[in-house]
Image: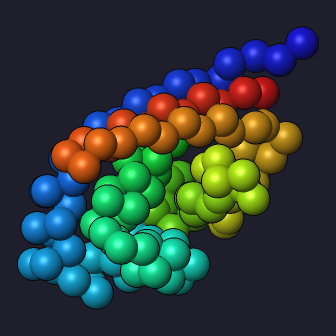
Amino acid sequence: MSTVRGIGVDVVDVERMKKMLREQGDAFTARVFTEAEIAYCRSKKNPHEHFAARFAAKEAVSKALQTGWTGEFRWKDVEVMNEPSGAPKIALYGQLAKLLEGNMIHLSLSHTENTVVAFALIEA
């Protein structure tokens, strides 16, 4: 039988992400996103929408961990990828991968041109 270990949700304003990307640029993206995420987002027509979705997903995972920002969570240890169907999935790296070994993370993303919502569930 599986057990829910944690749930998390986050909402991101797309315009705010666009402003942050404009003001902080590469310094922000390099700190928060993996190279694969950056390449994926920049390949899209409206990259800021995709950066916003990935940011919301990372925040939702951090909330599902229920640890706060205690050092166990690092931005680039959570990577948002896509299944061939387009469905989002999470890949984990570093200490976070070790911490959540044997667990499954379910992720749902939804967005309009103005708002992104991400929901993450960690299942043991």
User: Can you see residue 90?
Assistant: no
Residue 23 left/right relative to 39:
left
The colour style of the image is: rainbow
Image quadrant in which you'd find residue 63: top left
How many marks on residues?
A: 0
Q: Residue furthest front?
A: 45
- Residue 114: x and y in percent read 20, 46
Looking at the image, is 50 positioned above or below residue 22? above
Residue 88 left/right relative to 61:
right
- Residue 64: x and y in percent read 51, 32
- Residue 12: x and y in percent read 26, 45
Residue drawn 20% across and 74% down? 21
| Depth order, front residue of 94/30 | 30
Residue drawn 78% across and 27% down? 124
Looking at the image, is 63 positioned above or below residue 5? below
Q: Residue furthest right?
A: 1
Residue 75 left/right relative to 101:
left
Q: Could you tell me which quadrant the N terminus lies in?
A: top right
- Residue 99: x and y in percent read 70, 47
Residue drawn 38% across and 47% down? 56
Image quadrant in which you'd find residue 16: bottom left
Looking at the image, is 23 positioned above or below residue 115? below
Residue 4 left/right relative to 53:
right
